[in-house]
Image (cartoon, rainbow, N blue to C red):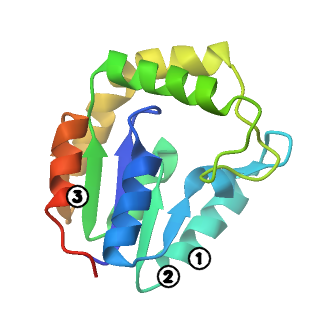
Amino acid sequence: MKKIIILGSPGAGKSTFSFALAEKTGLPLYHLDKMFWREGWVNVSKDELDAQIKDVLRKDEWIIDGNYSRTIPMRLEKCDTVFYLDYPRLVCFFGVVRRVLGSLGKTRPDMAEGCPERFDLEFLKFVWNFRKKKRAGILALLEGANAEIHIFRSRKEAKRYLDGMEKV
């Protein structure tokens, strides 16, 4: 387990899981939100995001946290392990609400500088519909992956996995 991707709906806890996994494994952690966003919630071009991801994929070890569905195939091609946090809609929705309320106006450590947490109705709609609109596509991609796949259906399952790992 040296090249890992972490997928799941916003609010599932991908970043929380990835921070804990990085601490347990000692692997370098990369957040796609940090690559995609620039100060003031300005996004980079597809070409720039792809170039940044490809730079990470060339490394010997990494954890990449985030979905950005268009880029999943290129990451699946290079990873050896996938963690998919496949949680119910309400768990993820309330995870985002809790995150917004707890971090409103502050920049999270998994987000680019100058992108403070904010209330965004469109984003909440995306989270609400994530499982219905994105889940089947992600699972189809995972079926064809040449990697060890871990699918967690609850936060307890993910925590149990992390708790069972030896720290490097």
Out of 144 and 79, give the one closest to the viewer: 79
> The residue tagged with tag 3: helix, strand or loop?
helix
Which residue, given by chain and number where applicable, does mark 2 sit on?
58
Q: What amino acid type is highlighted by mark number 1?
A: Asp
- Asked whether the beta carbons under mark 2 and mark 3 sit within 8 Å of each other, the answer is no
Quadrant of the snapshot with the N terminus: bottom left
Percent across and percent down for residue 99 are 55, 30
Percent across and percent down for residue 167 are 26, 76
Q: CA distance from mark 2 to mark 3?
A: 26 Å
Q: Quadrant of residue 24?
A: bottom left
Side of 111 relative to 160 (left or right): right
Label 1 neighbour load within 10 Å: few <14, some 14-19, many 20+: few
> The residue tagged with tag 2: helix, strand or loop?
loop
Q: Quadrant of residue 5?
A: bottom left
The residue depicted at 37 percent of the width and 60 percent of the height is 20
Label 3 neighbour load within 10 Å: few <14, some 14-19, many 20+: some
The residue depicted at 41 percent of the width and 77 percent of the height is 27
Between disc 2 and disc 3, whose residue precedes?
A: 2
Which residue, given by chain and number where applicable, does mark 1 sit on?
55
Quadrant of the snapshot with the C terminus: bottom left
Res 73 visible: no
- Asked whether the beta carbons under mark 2 and mark 1 sit within 8 Å of each other, the answer is yes
Between disc 1 and disc 3, whose residue precedes?
A: 1
Q: Which mark is residue 162?
A: 3
